[in-house]
Image: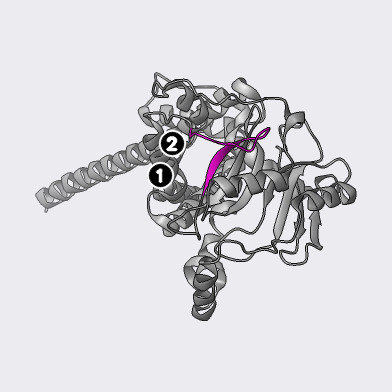
């Protein structure tokens, strides 16, 4: 049993090694994406717009939406976020003028409703965006997202099988046999890094697989599992910017959410995102200050036409899995504990690459040893045959 599991563990590692190396390296880099964006930002003139950071002076949702529509004719507001940029600046998602089925985030002064200029872009932004795409899709589109999910699942299986194979790890966990053979050194290093990072890798593997693998539904059955006829209907609907009842008041929906879910701090509103006519959603936090569950842990769904409540998800009453789902984001990205956690996540993010490298070295050294022994046995056999022939 142990020998078969060892072979399975080895082959899973060899098959996934390069992919996990790329995902681990890019993940470690992206832990500090925000900091790198700020550090490497290109010099720019000071903004002329003075933003009032007093959130008590912010306009109500209906007024803000109307002001943005007036400043951006032909484009529709489809979502709103109050904390993405902070400091009295809200984020509005507006449809693109050339394609209303797609949308971009813009900045809006919460106190006046004025659309603010885009922030100056870091010269490194395109490279960080490239690293992000490499991280979650291997630059292969939807199929790459699926393959990255498979790699994440393999990372989980490697961690679980490694725990079994090295179940006596506490005896020699931090022992590195420097003066022994290279194969033993790589084996010790592989075990030390693997066991030390196994919880981290299980978390990353589970969250990555949970997010990426469902894309197989779109790959097999089409986007959102829709038929060709439905897709044509979406194409027609995509030309219509507003896909919700324009008579609905967002302010009233927010008040209704506060009544139904006491303690909810609303942070984001999704009206009805293209291309499909989805329910309107109000997302916020019922446990303010808890960074491990983030600022988007509870949701209320409203019908896009009638405004009636369709579904509610309150973090305080969620199942253990529901609560873990909420924590997946902060746990995966290391955003729950400030700089120390980010540094730790960056270092641990290198572990899949180290494990891939040490695993390959172990396999190569083992194969060399086996080939050497086979060659030695062949030479001895040849000598024996010659000696036997000489005695005949």
Locate residue 369, reporting x and y percent: 31, 38
Q: Are marks 2 and 1 in contact (CB under 8 Å)?
A: yes
Residue identifier under label 2: 26
Locate residue 280, reporting x and y percent: 70, 58
Q: How is the image coloured?
A: one colour
Residue identifier under label 1: 134
Locate residue 126, reporting x and y percent: 37, 37
Query: In screen coordinates, is 148 left or right of 173?
Result: left
Q: Which residue is pictured at 38% across the width and 44% down the height?
A: 18
- Which residue range is magenta in the image? 104-118
Is residue 5 or residue 61 the one in the foreground?
Answer: 61
Q: In what element is the residue under mark 2?
A: helix
Query: In screen coordinates, is 40 left or right of 270?
Result: left
| Residue farthest bottom in this picture | 229
Q: Is residue 111 a member of the stretch shown in magenta?
A: yes
| Residue farthest front in this picture | 70
* Upstream in sequence: badge 2 or badge 1: 2
Picture quarter with the C terminus: bottom left
């Amino acid at each position: 049993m142990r020998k078969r599991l060892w072979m399975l563990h080895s082959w899973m590692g060899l098959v996934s090694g390069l992919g996990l190396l790329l995902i681990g390296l890019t993940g470690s880099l992206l832990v500090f994406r925000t900091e790198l964006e700020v550090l490497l930002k290109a010099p720019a003139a000071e903004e002329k717009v003075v933003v009032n950071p007093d959130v008590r002076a912010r306009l109500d949702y209906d007024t803000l939406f109307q002001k943005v529509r007036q400043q951006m004719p032909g484009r529709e507001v489809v979502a709103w976020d109050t904390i993405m940029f902070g400091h009295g600046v809200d984020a509005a998602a507006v449809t693109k003028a050339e394609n209303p089925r797609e949308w971009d985030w813009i900045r809006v002064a919460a106190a006046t409703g004025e659309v603010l200029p885009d922030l100056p872009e870091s010269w490194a932004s395109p490279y960080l965006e490239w690293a992000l795409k490499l991280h979650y899709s291997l630059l292969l589109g939807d199929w790459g997202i699926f393959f990255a999910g498979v790699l994440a699942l393999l990372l989980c299986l490697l961690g679980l099988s490694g725990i079994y194979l090295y179940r006596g790890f506490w005896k020699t966990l931090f022992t590195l046999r420097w003066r022994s053979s290279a194969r033993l050194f790589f084996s010790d290093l592989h075990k030390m890094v693997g066991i030390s990072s196994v919880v981290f890798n299980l978390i990353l593997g589970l969250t990555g697989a949970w997010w990426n693998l469902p894309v197989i539904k779109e790959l097999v059955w089409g986007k959102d599992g829709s038929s060709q006829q439905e897709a044509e209907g979406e194409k027609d609907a995509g030309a219509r910017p507003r896909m919700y009842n324009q008579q609905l008041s967002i302010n009233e929906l927010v008040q209704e959410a506060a009544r139904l879910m006491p303690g909810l701090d609303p942070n984001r509103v999704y009206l009805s995102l293209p291309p499909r006519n989805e329910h309107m959603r109000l997302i916020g936090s019922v446990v303010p200050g808890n960074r491990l569950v983030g600022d988007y842990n509870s949701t209320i769904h409203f019908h896009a036409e009638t405004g009636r409540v369709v579904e509610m998800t309150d973090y305080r009453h969620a199942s253990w899995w529901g609560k873990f789902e909420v924590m997946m984001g902060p746990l995966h990205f290391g955003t729950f504990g400030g700089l120390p956690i980010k540094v730790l996540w960056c270092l641990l993010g290198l572990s899949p690459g180290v494990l891939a490298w040490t695993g390959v070295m172990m396999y190569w050294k083992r194969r060399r040893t086996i080939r050497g022994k086979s060659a030695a046995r062949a030479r001895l056999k040849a000598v024996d045959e010659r000696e036997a022939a000489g005695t005949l």
